[in-house]
Amino acid sequence: TCVQLELLADTAGRGEHLEAIVDPADPDARPAPRPDLRRMLVPIGPVAVFGASNFPLAFGVAGGDAASALAAGCPVLVKGHPCHPGTGELVAAELAAALAQAGLPAGTFAHLLSAGHEVGVALVEHPDVRAVAFTGSRRGGRALMDRAAARPAPIPVFAEMGSLNPLVVTEAALDARGEAIAEGLVASVCTFGGQLCTKPGIVFVPATDAGDAFAAELAGAFEQREPEVMLSGAIRDAFAAGIARAAALEGAELVAGAAAGDEPPGFRSRPVVLRTWADRIGAPGMDALAEEHFGPGVVLARYGAPGEVVAALERLGGQLTGTLHAQPGEPGARELWDALTRVAGRVVFDGFPTGVSVTWAMQHGGPYPSSSDGAHTSVGPTAMRRFLRPVALQSAPAELLPAALRDGNPLGLARREDGVLRP
């Protein structure tokens, strides 16, 4: 969380997020003389941020959404998540003190704590709010999107709404390092109780003896794990119900995990492995297999040819991540890689997607339904772009120009001048 704050602060301090562009007047331009045009990004205004249940810090009161909005120059109103009210209050106090120390107005930040929906609705519908940032479920994200679209003046909602994060394993990869893939997959699915938005939820494995051996190894490893701690009773119950719906479908079988009614006490769930066929993923009547099971569970989907995986990925739609375990130069690997690239915001080769680096190149956001707007990320400096809009100033006198657009570049920005990018 601190690394993220520091990176955004450094970026804003250098003015890199402004994307300043200066096109001086050119009386000889064709087909007509060109006026002086100067363009930059400006803050859109107050942003309502909905904190996530699973990241009290990194996606909480001072998390990526709030931090990137503040760095962009927008006031922020955070609706803290009721799963961790104490943490939210502590962070809010520190953030308010830091903003006051920096000399910013008192209205720059507000923390609202409520378990009900009324506060959230009021935030989205308030005429002064200019954008919404949300991390959570598809149902919650869609509700906010619909509310925001129904306003007299609609506003954008940047919602990250969960993902199945498909992972594809080829026959050659199993032959080369099947044991290592299984070990890494167990950690990726079960760490933090499987309650990460980048957890692999569906794994495509070959319908071969090697694929069946891999599934058996994975199931055995899941059975050896202790019950995982869940974030809340509601999340535990939703996970159990979702797994039960999926296991009841024709062509699906539970190969590891507890049967319904055999859950451990407390906010805990046993790790679960379901097995089915690739042609059932995303097929009519099989919705429960294509739902995000927010917890320590994974669906193994057997396939006979890469084309079956490609078709399943197209049925699933947008994802935050996609992963391919294959051997370099392996036939069919390019087809699978291209298919993952079409549906996912971040594509991983020979790894696991649960680690999200806070860097310039990170893309944490994918096509709908994983995100409401796949053109943006919620992690890294470019997350600020969500809360900025372009303004072009034409023939403005020097005294009305912001420093970022003045002649001589007084801020020393990297900016484009007369079509040339200058450091």
Image (spheres, grey):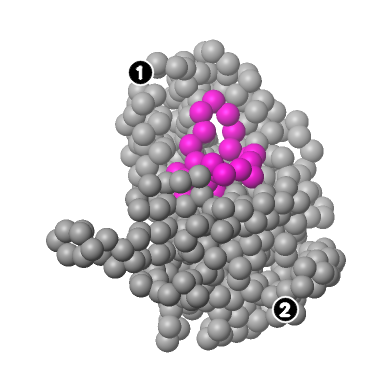
The image quadrant of residue 12 is bottom right
SS under mark 2: loop
Horizontal and vertical percent for residue 122?
60, 84
Residue lying at 35% horizontally and 59% vertically, measured from the top left: 23
Residue assigned mark 1: 331
Judge whether 92 appears above or below 327 on screen.
below
Nearer to the camera, 112 or 235: 112
Q: Is residue 348 visible?
A: yes
The image's mark for residue 105 is 2
Classify residue 122 as left or right of residue 101: left
Q: Residue at x 42, y 58 (%)?
A: 21
Kindly identify the residue that appears in the image at 72 percent across and 40 percent down.
Answer: 191
Q: Is residue 202 above or below residue 267?
A: above
* Residue 252 locus on image (x, y percent): 49, 41
Q: CA distance from mark 2 to mark 1?
A: 60 Å
CB under 8 Å between callouts 2 and 1?
no
Most prominent secondary structure in the magenta stretch?
loop
Label 1 Cα neighbours within 10 Å, binned few <14 / some 14-19 / many ≥20? few
On the rendered structure, is 12 left or right of 345?
right
Name the kind of residue labelled 2 in the image.
Pro
Q: Which of marks 1 and 2 precedes in the sequence?
A: 2
Work out whether residue 4 can be spotted.
no
Start-end of magenta stretch: 344-369
- Residue type at mark 1: give it: Pro
205 and 64: which is toward the camera: 64
Q: Residue furthest left?
A: 31
Residue 307 figure quarter: top left
Where, by quadrant of the figure, is residue 58 drawn?
Answer: bottom right
